[in-house]
């Protein structure tokens, strides 16, 4: 499904957080949203799924504008994996995944065979079927994140939004989650938009990168065109270069050092 | 490892829910009969049953059962159910298993309303309903005040709500102390109201409290599934199509109505809203679709049993039931804290 974001603006009170942000993503594409802290990455994601109402601009899913859709309708099109949140109540993994069926059920309707089958498929994809009966409070960080992804998949979305899906995970689980997400995009033709802080992982797994700085889109496009030494110096204040890693078969960002701050007190570690 | 059969897991869960509901309904029925039977003159459960079915016609016994004991037991059931479901809703909204109606300051608000009515002698003006009416008004008023203070830029952050509730609650607690200080010979009335009890129960009170508690509970149960999502995080809930701000507001209003209806007749009865949801959660898990009805049944039984205990333990004197619930509740809660921390995910 095609996602088209045009001229989105958002601000908390009078402070602008997003200014004129626009991009397009096709079905099967994985789009990475990168930028330093406070650049508006999460806000952009929230504007896309109607958790926040943009002041201006539009978000279109195929030919439908989401501002004209009910929240539940949006939830049927878009699955969201929010930033890691501690689950305080001992719901089982299956119960969490079945919550993804909520938008498709009536207020007092219980989940039926069809919903269980969808949950089973989602859990199989996210490799959490074995955990079905276990309470979330007993699962490891990686397992929890996979359960939340399964919950998003149980919404049978056409678009998947992920907010730092690899945060707090060890390296093994980071790769595992991102492998899974990119395979999903390919296999089920999902449009994936993913906020990340990890330049290297984003370069490796994304088809397209959006680079945000103070709420503005600095660059958008293919990995080597966006993650240029100039852009990374400007946005992240680092010296880095992006190369194609033939061994991995993907782009990799090589971080060489960081720039001293304006006052010059912090020294960059040179390579 | 063999993949678990999701259908079986799901069906087993539903079977457990049904079993728990049936057992709790049976327990409620038994407590109703036993609660009516126990008192200064003991009437056998068989006789109580006979009065219900019409086979016992002795005027004195019928009068004791129908005019004195039954309204008290039914009011107890309604109050217990109200406090329990209010606890469920607050714990869900605040994503905090320690939350209870008192955390929003609404119990303290109700207490101030009641003590104001007692000190000003309002009952002289408007009959015996002055205290309940004032506590009801202050209960709702406190909720609106707390909500209004917490609202910034169109949204109500849960953390702000919690802190505002504690602060407003402390203010009203201080005002209650002040009322006690200036109460003079009315001090005893205030203290007894604050201790909580079902002593003055009448059918009129039952007729007023019951519809309010039922309406509030129905309103809350509309949002049971949304509340499940909110306990795992507001972002999860909103991404699944839940209007979290609306849910918070509706649940707060419903909670206040239910609590106000209960405490305005019974006074402050603590810990029911804390103990019951926890016990039920241990039995059936954290899903609000079962937590709500099961807590209603269990809260009702619990209140009937503790009230019966309060009536007989120091007979012929009667212990305020709030003392009993607190004496049972606080140690039980500490036990939970030590033993079940991991299971409850605290």
Image (cartoon, rainbow, N blue to C red):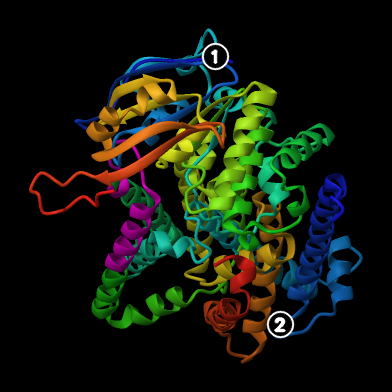
Q: Nearer the viewer, residue A119 or A190?
A: A190
Q: Identify the main secondary structure in magenta.
A: helix
Helix, strand or loop at disc 2? loop
Say above or below: B111 vs B138: below
Say above or below: A157 vs B97: above
Marks 2 and 1 belong to one chain: no
Q: Residue at x 29, y 33 (%)?
A: A232
- Report which quarter residue B134 is drawn in: bottom left
**Horizontal and vertical percent position of residue B16:** 82, 57
Is B151 one of the magenta-colored residues?
A: yes
**Horizontal and vertical percent position of residue A114:** 81, 32
Name the disc covering residue B123, or none.
none
Q: Residue at x 48, y 39 (%)?
A: A201
Say above or below: B146 vs B302: above
Name the disc covering residue A2, or none.
1
**Horizontal and vertical percent position of residue A222:** 44, 21
The quadrant of the image that shows the N terminus of chain A is top right
Residue B212 in view of the camera: no
Q: Which residue is mark 2?
A: B39
Q: Nearer the viewer, residue A80 or B77?
A: A80
- Give the magenta-colored segment's residue range: B149-172
Q: Chain of mark 2?
A: B
> Would residue A54 be found to the left or right of residue B249 on screen?
left
Is A265 one of the magenta-colored residues?
A: no
- The 10 Å Cα crowd at callout 2, few under 14, some 14 to 19, many 20 or more, is some
C-alpha distance separating marks 2 and 1: 72 Å
């Amino acid at each position: 499904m095609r996602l088209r974001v045009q001229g989105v603006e958002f601000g908390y009170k009078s402070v602008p957080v997003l200014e004129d942000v626009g991009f397009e993503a096709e079905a099967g594409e994985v789009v990475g949203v990168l930028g330093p802290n406070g650049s508006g990455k999460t806000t952009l994601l929230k504007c896309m799924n109607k958790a926040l109402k943009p002041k201006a601009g539009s978000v279109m899913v195929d030919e439908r504008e989401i501002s004209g859709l009910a929240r539940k309708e949006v939830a049927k099109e878009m699955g969201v994996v929010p930033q890691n949140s501690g689950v305080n109540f001992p719901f089982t993994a299956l119960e969490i995944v079945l919550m993804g069926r909520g938008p498709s059920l009536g207020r007092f309707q219980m989940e039926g065979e069809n919903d269980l089958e969808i949950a089973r498929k989602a859990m199989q994809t996210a490799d959490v079927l074995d955990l079905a009966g276990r309470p979330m409070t007993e699962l490891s960080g990686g397992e929890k994140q996979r359960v939340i992804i399964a919950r998003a998949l149980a919404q049978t979305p056409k678009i998947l939004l992920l907010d730092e899906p690899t945060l707090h995970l060890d390296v093994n689980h980071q790769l595992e989650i991102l492998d899974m997400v990119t395979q999903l995009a390919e296999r089920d033709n999902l449009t994936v938009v993913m906020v990340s802080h990890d330049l290297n992982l984003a370069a490796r797994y994304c088809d397209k990168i959006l680079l945000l700085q103070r709420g503005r889109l600095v660059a958008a496009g293919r990995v080597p065109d966006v993650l240029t030494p100039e852009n990374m110096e400007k946005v992240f204040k680092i010296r880095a270069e992006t190369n194609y890693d033939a061994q991995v078969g993907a782009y990799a960002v090589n971080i060489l050092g960081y720039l001293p701050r304006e006052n010059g007190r912090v020294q960059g570690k040179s390579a | 490892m063999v993949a678990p059969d999701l259908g079986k897991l799901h069906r087993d869960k539903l079977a457990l829910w049904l079993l728990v509901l049936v057992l709790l309904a049976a327990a409620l029925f038994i407590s109703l009969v036993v609660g009516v039977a126990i008192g200064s003159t003991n009437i056998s459960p068989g006789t109580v049953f006979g009065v219900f079915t019409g086979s016992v016609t002795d005027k004195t016994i019928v009068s004791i059962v129908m005019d004195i004991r039954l309204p008290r037991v039914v009011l107890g059931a309604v109050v217990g159910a109200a406090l329990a479901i209010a606890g469920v809703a607050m714990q869900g909204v605040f994503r905090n298993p320690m939350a209870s109606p008192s955390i929003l300051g609404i119990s303290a608000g109700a207490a101030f309303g009641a003590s104001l009515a007692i000190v000003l002698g309002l009952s002289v003006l408007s009959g015996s309903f002055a205290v309940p009416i004032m506590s009801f008004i202050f209960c709702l008023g406190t909720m609106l005040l707390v909500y209004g203070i917490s609202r910034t830029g169109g949204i109500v952050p849960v953390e702000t709500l919690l802190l505002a509730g504690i602060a407003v609650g402390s203010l009203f607690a201080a005002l209650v102390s002040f009322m006690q200080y200036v109460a003079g010979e009315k001090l005893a009335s205030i203290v007894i109201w604050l201790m909580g009890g079902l002593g003055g129960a009448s059918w009129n009170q039952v007729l007023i409290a019951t519809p309010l508690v039922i309406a509030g509970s129905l309103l809350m149960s509309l949002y049971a599934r949304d509340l499940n999502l909110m306990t795992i995080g507001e972002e999860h809930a909103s991404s699944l199509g839940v209007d979290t701000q609306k849910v918070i507001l509706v649940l707060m209003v419903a909670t206040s109505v239910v609590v106000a209806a209960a405490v305005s007749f019974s006074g402050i009865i603590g810990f029911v809203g804390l103990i019951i949801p926890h016990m039920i959660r241990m039995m059936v898990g954290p899903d609000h679709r079962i937590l709500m009805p099961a807590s209603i049944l269990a809260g009702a039984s619990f209140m009937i049993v503790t009230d019966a205990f309060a009536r007989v333990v120091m007979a012929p004197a009667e212990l305020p039931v709030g003392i009993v619930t607190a004496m049972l509740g606080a140690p039980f809660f500490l036990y939970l804290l030590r033993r079940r921390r991991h299971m409850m995910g605290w």
